[in-house]
Image: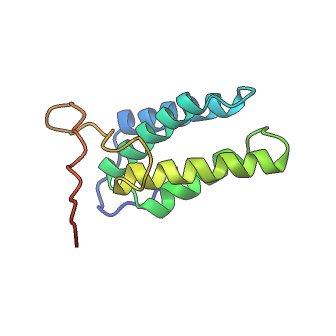
Amino acid sequence: MDRHRVGSRALSLEEVEDALDLRSVIAASLATTPVDDHALRRGVWTYVCAERDLGTRPGSVIITLTEMVESSTIAPRSVRDVVMRRVILWCVEAYFGHLGGEGVGLCATADTGEVPLAPPMIVSNR
């Protein structure tokens, strides 16, 4: 597994197995006809949050997800492109935070295992 991580710590066997399991969930969602968007989104968010917590760079996560969508059997190409755009958007949302989707703050915190609430929106009349 070729990961580009920010830190230099080697991955444990459990971490490698978890990543493989999470990728298999995404692959299974991509294999359904039609694609199960709900399951796919949850799989992407879970995978991305786990990779982010391990220190994997966002570009590496995007490349992995892109390869998964490209290797899927989704046809025609236009449908695969739509799925690709959704997966990349969900990836960026999960890694960096809210960009306009409903999945804000879905990554559980490592300390409590609880899903934090989205931060309040700052509103100004200026």
Horizontal side of residue 15 vs 59, given as left or right: left
Circle count: 0
Say which quarter of the image contains residue 45: top left
The single residue placed furthest to the front in the displayed view is 125
Which residue is located at x 49 percent, y 54 percent? Answer: 61
Q: Position of residue 36 (x, y in %)?
A: 63, 28
Horizontal side of residue 17 vs 55, given as left or right: right
Which residue is located at x 71 percent, y 26 percent? Answer: 32
The image's colour scheme reads rainbow
Q: Position of residue 42 (x, y in %)?
A: 47, 33
Q: Is residue 13 above or below residue 70?
A: above
The single residue placed furthest to the right in the displayed view is 76
Q: Is residue 29 above or below residue 98?
A: above
Name the residue nearer the viewer: 107 or 28: 107
Name the residue nearer the viewer: 98 or 59: 98
Q: Is residue 53 visible?
A: yes
Q: Is residue 2 visible?
A: no
Image quadrant in which the C terminus is located = bottom left
Say which quarter of the image contains residue 17: top left
Name the residue nearer the viewer: 74 or 8: 74
Horizontal side of residue 57 vs 33, given as left or right: left
Which residue is located at x 40 percent, y 41 percent? Answer: 103
Which residue is located at x 79 percent, y 38 percent? Answer: 73
Q: Position of residue 23 (x, y in %)?
A: 54, 37
The single residue placed furthest to the left in the displayed view is 111
Q: Position of residue 5 (x, y in %)?
A: 38, 60
Q: Is residue 53 above or below residue 115?
A: below
